[in-house]
Image (tube, helix red, strand yellow):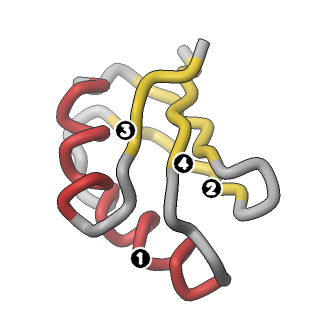
Amino acid sequence: YKRQIKISNMKCNGCVANVEKALQGLPGLESATVSLQQANAVLSGDFDLDEAIRRVTEAGYPAEKQD
């Protein structure tokens, strides 16, 4: 299923690539669509959302759950 996280601090396509890289290898994640314009990521699969948020935040882009 799909979940969204809100991401702060993304300013360019390089930031988007960094967020995508942070999410790579997350167990159970099937796909991640990161949007610079919407400042979010749409994630699909059976994965740990808190772990996804932790990885993105540790990469320098504060993230939080988005309903």
Pointer 4: what residue?
32
Q: In which quarter of the image is residue 22?
A: bottom left
Residue closer to the observer: 57 or 27? 57
Circles 4 and 3, Cβ within 8 Å, touching? The answer is yes
Farthest right residue in view: 37
Pointer 1: what residue?
18
Q: What residue type is labelled 2?
A: Val
Q: In which quarter of the image is residue 14?
A: bottom right
Mark 1 or mark 4: which is in front?
Answer: 1
Give the spatial CA distance, label 1 vs label 3: 16 Å
Which numbered dot is residue 29? 3
Q: What residue type is labelled 4?
A: Ala
Figure label count: 4
Give the spatial CA distance, label 3 vs label 2: 13 Å
Q: Tell me the crowding category of disc 3: few under 14, some 14 to 19, or many 20 or more residues within 10 angstroms, Cα based.
A: some
Q: In this view, does 54 lie above or below 2?
A: below
Q: Is residue 33 left or right of residue 26?
A: right
Q: Which of marks 1 and 4 is nearer the N terminus?
A: 1
Q: Is residue 51 left or right of residue 7?
A: left
Q: Tell me the crowding category of disc 1: few under 14, some 14 to 19, or many 20 or more residues within 10 angstroms, Cα based.
A: some
Name the element at disc 1: helix
Circles 4 and 2, Cβ within 8 Å, touching? The answer is yes
Give the spatial CA distance, label 4 vs label 2: 6 Å
Give the spatial CA distance, label 2 vs label 1: 10 Å
> Which residue is drawn at the image coordinates 41% and 76% (left, top)?
18
Q: Earlier in the sequence, mark 2 or mark 1?
A: 1
Name the element at disc 4: strand
> Which residue is drawn at the image coordinates 71% and 56% (left, top)?
35
Residue closer to the observer: 53 or 32? 53
Q: Which of marks 3 and 2 is nearer the N terminus?
A: 3
Q: Quadrant of the N terminus?
A: top right
